[in-house]
Image (tube, rainbow, N blue to C red):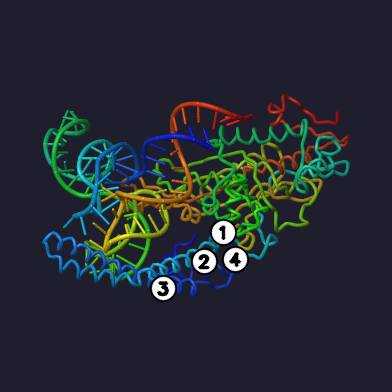
Amino acid sequence: MYDIKWIRENADAFEKGRKRRGLEPLSTQLLALDDARRAAIGELQKAQERRNAASKEIGAAMKAGDAAKAEALKAEVALIKENWPSLEEAERYAIAELDAALASIPNTPLAEVPDGADEHDNVEVARWGEPRTFDFTPKEHFDIGEGLGFMDFEAAARLSGARFVVNKGPLARLERALAQFMLDLHTGEHGYMEVNPPLLVRDDAMFGTAQLPKFREDQFGAVRQLTYDEAFDAAVEAGDDVSKFRPTMDYWLIPTAEVPLTNLVRECILDESQLPLRMTAGTYCFRAEAGAAGKDTRGMIRQHQFYKVELVSITTPEQSLEEHERMTGCAEKILQALDLPYRKVVLCTGDMGFASQKTYDLEVWLPGQGKYREISSCSVCGDFQARRMNARFRAASGATAGGAATNDGKPRFVHTLNGSGVAVGRAMVAVLENYQEADGSVTVPLALRPYMGGLTKIERT
RNA sequence: GGAGGGGUGGCCGAGUGGUUGAAGGCGCACGCCUGGAAAGUGUGUAUGCGGGAAACCGUAUCGCGGGUUCGAAUCCCGCCCCCUCCGCCA
């Protein structure tokens, strides 16, 4: 979320950033909304000031026993209040209009982010591991899984429709093993605190990390069914047919643990000594995939429900870029430990997420597809989410960053970062494809064997 | 679901209609005291918004939203959240 004051003073930089994302200029309209807002606030405050002053005088007059004066003042206030409601209405409307406009503006890319229109303009910055050479044609993960008899898309479709899967036996365990392995590495080696957050969250949380208001259609909602009586009353009140019982939507299903983890610091004033705050969580994630019809329809690559280990860091503004590199490194360590070849790309301006200033994607090699596919996405969001959440910190006393006058004792917005560390479902896809054997079995990666009860190979039984 | 108790500043906690943005305490900051520290002591310590070069001024904020009133932390209504006991439930 942008600070309108910043836009007012840095309109050029703001527009430059928009242009790099391929967006039309907006600052003129925003500043007009801002002018309207300030004018409305000013008018209301003027009225309030006169009302307050008169009220004090009334108090004084009554104490002095001057009833006539008090009555005269009361009449004056009554006059002031005549168009009070319209002033309030105008103020509220002006503020809401500006806020709504600001809430749907994406973050500005950092200078070093490459310009570009879409994923074709992303820039590879590193490559790790050598794709294995096969003396047979490697299969895609769904063929491997179904061949093993432990991955069932048809059963999932009967239960839930498209974009679901049922994993069983050693594959169910493999998914659990992957998640546990990742969490152990992040908590044991990388200094992240494991968190079990709610998977159902309110509007405010979804707004904080910027899934709302712009990306409603990508989300699932969780609905609490009304009782019969509540539904009846609601229908009557709404003038609806009482045979239709309308539910109320109370929660959103998280599309990523970024939402609850980042929002853990919402409306908080942290102490600088607590930063950086590093948190990790293994959770299911739920996505409607509304805009992805026809994409990745087969297999586990794109599901409505998937498991993911997420990394979130809360830092000072001075720490965030360094933390971004570190976080991406932590995700890379997972792939390295699993010996999965990958490449690291920096997303171009046109492919970056809404809240991000800069994003690295890790793309794992999938021999069955013969492609690198996204398995992790690590973003630094600056204070964009912090503003939406009102998440701040108080600088350690006396300390100023690099001698800069950053410490006037006031709370400052934190910086937030999030990254997959890594997507568990896709990691399983990668393991199956990279570790497949000619006979259809799958070798268990060394790092996962302790989590698989020592099992070395998954085969049809 | 039933019964009850609560939501006030970074924290604790007073405050039932009129200089209350809010007593008191804790914490914190700075100063004094000290050889140094502790203790003691003095001063200062919320946030948003608007205006201003600044000092500062104005305005709003005592869970949220309405209402009563010239004036609301204080009275009325609705909602949200938290807690305790009982019941139900994984």
Q: Distance between the residues labelled 3 and 2?
A: 14 Å
Q: What is the spatial separation of the Cα atoms under label 4 and label 1, in whole angstroms?
A: 19 Å
Choose between A20 and A165: the one closer to the eye.
Answer: A165
How far across and how far down the image is residue A27, in percent?
A: 49, 72
Asked if residue A71 is positioned above or below residue A128 in the image, the reply reads: below
Marks 2 and 1: in contact by CB < 8 Å? no
Amino acid marked by disc 3: Asp
The residue pinned by badge 2 equals A101
| Tag shown at residue A21 | 4
Q: Which of marks 4 and 3 is in front?
A: 3
Give the Cα distance between marks 3 and 1: 24 Å
In 3D space, how far apart are the residues under numbered discs 1 and 2 (Cα atoms)? 11 Å
Q: Which residue is drawn at 78% across and 47% down?
A: A161
In this rendering, do the residues under marks 3 and 2 share a single chain?
Answer: yes
The earlier-in-sequence mark between 3 and 1 is 3
* Chain of the residue displaying label 3: A
Q: Which amino acid does label 2 sit on?
A: Ala
Of the image marks 4 and 1, the number of the one nearer the N terminus: 4
As shown in the figure, which amino acid type bears the numbered disc 4? Arg
Query: Given contact means CB atoms under 8 Å apart, are the residues at marks 3 and 1 in contact?
Result: no
N-terminal label among 4 and 3: 4
Residue A65: x percent and y percent? 11, 62
Q: Which chain carries label 1?
A: A
